[in-house]
Image (tube, rainbow, N blue to C red):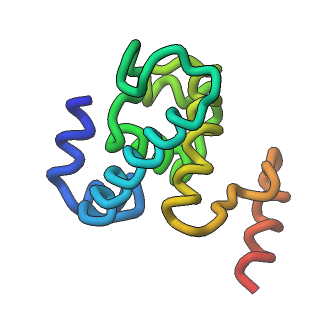
Amino acid sequence: MQLLSSLLRDERTLKVIFGIGKDKFDELAVGMERLWHKHLESKPDRERAVGGGQHGKIPTGRQKVAFILFYLKVYPTFDVMPVFSAINRGDCRRWVHALLPLLEQLLGQKLALPREKSTRWRSFCRHFRKQGR
């Protein structure tokens, strides 16, 4: 993930894309790595010890945090997410559903995606007019 390495060098771009700075990103990455290992250890049907076998499509804590924060910030559909992650649509969905609870646990709060999907411009404007009051 060469792109992620270059993003982590530029604080401004990191804040624009993920909504947080490098220090907070690194803190979340360490916590995500710890929680991910705990999550893997808790699976009763595991055949190998943690660390054995394939390492998955998002192997590091940094990459996991980048993936889920990008999803939450941009909120792309699962048809669009593969363009940015090089992971197929179904796996993107599985990763989001696996990582979101871990991120919520790290942050100590429930994260909310938009309540409704606006398919028409009028409903989009109406929704945001309500938010501004």
Q: Eyeballing the image, is 1 above or below 25? A: above
The picture quadrant where one finds residue 61 is top left
For the C terminus, the image quarter is bottom right
Question: Measuring 18% from the left and 55% from the top, which residue is drawn there?
Answer: 10
> Percent from the top left, x then y, of residue 126?
82, 67
Which sits in the foreground, 21 or 120?
A: 21
Compared across the picture, whether 23 is left or right of 92 comes to left
Q: Nearer the viewer, residue 72 or 13?
A: 72
Residue at the image point whose x is 23% and y is 46% from the top: 7
Locate residue 68, reporting x and y percent.
Answer: 50, 45
Residue 39 in picture, x, y percent from top left: 54, 40
Quarter containing the N terminus: top left
Q: Is residue 55 left or right of residue 8?
A: right
Q: Is residue 4 above or below residue 102?
A: above
Res 86 → quadrant:
top left
Residue 28 appears at what percent x and percent y? 37, 57
Residue depicted at x 51% and y 24% = 82
Of residues 19 and 36, the one drawn nearer to the viewer in this rendering:
36
Depicted 103 relative to depicted 108: above or below: above
Residue beneath the point at 46% across and 16% down: 48
